[in-house]
Image (cartoon, grey):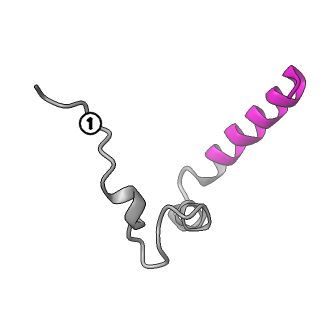
Amino acid sequence: MSKSEYEAVKKLLQQKRKDIKNNQTEARSILVNAGIFTEKGNLKKVYKDICTQPSQV
């Protein structure tokens, strides 16, 4: 991927993020299409055990 292609994709992603920022329905549909959430709005099994918070040792 060339630098110009990268910049074009980056610009498209930023615009899409702005478009769905206040649209919960569209944001949810994207997550369902990506396979992260089910149609009911639950996380798929493979994502349930992922912890993004740093451990408190």
Residue at the front extreme, as displayed? 46
Name the residue located 52 percent from the left edge and 65 percent from the top edge. Answer: 28
Residue 3 left/right relative to 18: right
Residue of label 1: 53
Q: Quadrant of residue 52?
A: top left
Report x, y in % for residue 12: 77, 41
Pick the residue in front: 12 or 47. Answer: 47
Report x, y in % for residue 35: 55, 64
Q: Amino acid at mark 1?
A: Gln
Pick the residue in front: 40 or 24. Answer: 40
Name the residue located 62 percent from the left edge and 66 percent from the top edge. Answer: 33
Quadrant in which the C terminus is drawn: top left
Name the residue located 54 percent from the left edge and 61 percent from the top edge. Answer: 31
Residue at the bottom extreme, as displayed? 40
Name the residue located 86 percent from the left edge and 29 percent from the top edge. Answer: 1
Say above or below: 22 vs 8: below
As helix, strand or loop, the secondary structure at mark 1 comes to: loop
Query: Can residue 23 be found in the magenta stretch?
Result: no
Residue 2 left/right relative to 29: right
Report x, y in % for residue 21: 55, 49
Picture mark count? 1
Q: Main secondary structure of the magenta part?
A: helix
The magenta-colored residue range is 1-17
Pick the residue in front: 36 or 26. Answer: 36
Residue 20 left/right relative to 11: left
